[in-house]
Image: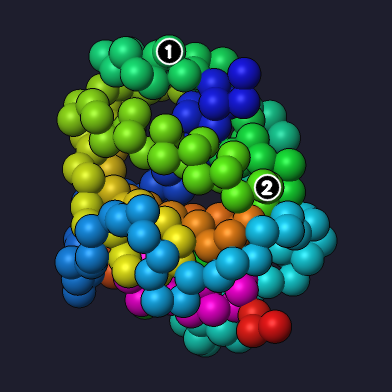
C-alpha cells in the first residue's frame, strides 16, 4: 500500500537529515506561520497536470539561488536499513517496511540537500513530488496527521534507536494546502531539531526540511521556483 512507504520514508528522511549534526540545532529566527486550511491560499494554482521527474529536477533550488554560503550535498547511495516504528500505532499501521531512501512514494520526484557553512551542522533539504492532486492531498495529510498525532515515539533504523518528539506547527499561508511540524531527534545522548514544511499546489508537492531558520528563509523561494508563472 502506497501510504506504508510514504509514512516511514518521511520519518526516516527527517532523521537522516540530522544524522550528521552534533548537538542541538537552534530554532534561530524561525517565525510562526498561518494555520492549515482547506481553502485556497495566496499563490494557489488550479494546475492539476502531474509534472515529470526531469522537469521537477530543473525546478529545484541551486546554490546560486541560496547564496555563496551554501553547497550542495552529494546524494546518498541506494542502501537502506530496515526501519521499525515503536510507540505510535498510527505510524505502525501505515508503515514498518524498509525505508525507501527518504523519498515519498509518489511517481514523479526530485530532491536536493544543501549544507549551510554559516552554522555548523545546518542543512536544508528540498523535495518536489508530483501526482494527481487528490492523491498528493490525501497522502500527505494522512502522513502529517499520523506523525503529529504521536507526541513521542521511537524509530529503530537498522540497529540504531532514535527517539522522536513531534510538535504540530501553524502552516504557512501558501498553496492549496500546507503542513508544518517540528521534530526533535534524540540519539546517542544528543538532540537535533528539524523543521518540516510541506506545501501542495495543484499537482505539485514541495517539502522543505532542516534547520528551522533555514526552512523559514527558503520555503517561499523554493515554492516560487517550483511553480514558475505560466
Which quadrant of the figure has residue 148? top left
Mark linked to residue 131 = 2
Mark linked to residue 225 = none
- Percent position (x, y) of residue 89? 32, 13
In this image, 156 relative to 3: left or right?
Answer: left
User: Can residue 113 be found in the magenta stretch?
Assistant: no
- Percent position (x, y) of residue 178? 38, 57
In this image, 207 relative to 216: left or right?
Answer: right
- Disc 1 on helix, strand or loop? helix
In this image, 39 relative to 17: left or right?
Answer: left
Which quadrant of the figure has residue 5? top right
18 or 147: which is nearer to us?
147
Q: Which residue is mark 1?
A: 93
User: Can residue 221 be found in the magenta stretch?
Assistant: yes
Q: What residue is at 81 percent from the left and 61 percent from the top?
A: 54
Provide the residue span drawn in magenta. 214-227
- Disc 2 on helix, strand or loop? loop
Using a 10 Å C-alpha cutoff, classify the residue at mark 1 as few (fewer than 14 neighbours), some (14 to 19) or many (20 or more).
Answer: few
Amino acid at each position: 500500500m502506497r501510504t506504508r512507504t510514504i509514512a516511514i520514508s518521511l520519518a526516516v528522511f527527517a532523521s537522516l537529515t540530522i544524522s550528521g549534526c552534533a548537538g542541538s540545532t537552534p530554532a534561530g529566527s524561525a517565525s510562526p506561520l498561518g494555520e492549515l486550511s482547506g481553502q485556497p491560499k495566496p499563490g494557489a494554482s488550479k494546475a492539476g497536470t502531474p509534472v515529470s521527474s526531469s522537469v521537477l529536477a530543473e525546478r529545484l533550488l541551486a546554490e546560486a539561488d541560496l547564496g555563496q554560503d551554501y553547497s550542495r550535498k552529494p546524494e546518498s547511495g541506494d542502501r537502506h536499513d530496515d526501519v521499525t516504528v515503536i510507540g505510535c500505532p498510527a505510524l505502525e499501521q501505515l508503515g514498518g517496511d524498509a525505508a525507501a531512501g527518504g523519498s515519498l512514494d509518489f511517481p514523479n520526484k526530485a530532491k536536493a540537500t544543501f549544507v549551510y557553512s554559516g552554522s555548523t551542522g545546518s542543512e536544508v533539504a528540498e523535495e518536489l513530488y508530483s501526482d494527481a492532486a487528490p492523491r498528493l492531498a490525501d497522502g500527505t495529510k494522512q502522513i502529517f496527521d499520523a506523525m503529529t498525532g504521536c507526541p513521542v515515539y521511537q524509530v529503530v533504523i537498522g540497529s540504531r534507536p532514535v527517539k522522536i518528539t513531534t510538535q504540530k506547527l501553524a502552516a504557512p499561508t501558501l498553496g492549496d494546502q500546507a503542513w508544518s511540524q517540528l521534530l526533535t531527534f534524540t540519539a546517542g545522548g544528543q538532540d537535533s531539531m528539524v523543521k518540516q514544511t510541506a506545501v501542495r499546489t495543484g499537482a505539485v508537492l514541495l517539502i522543505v526540511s532542516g534547520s528551522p531558520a533555514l526552512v523559514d528563509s527558503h520555503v517561499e523561494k523554493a515554492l516560487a521556483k517550483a511553480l514558475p508563472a505560466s
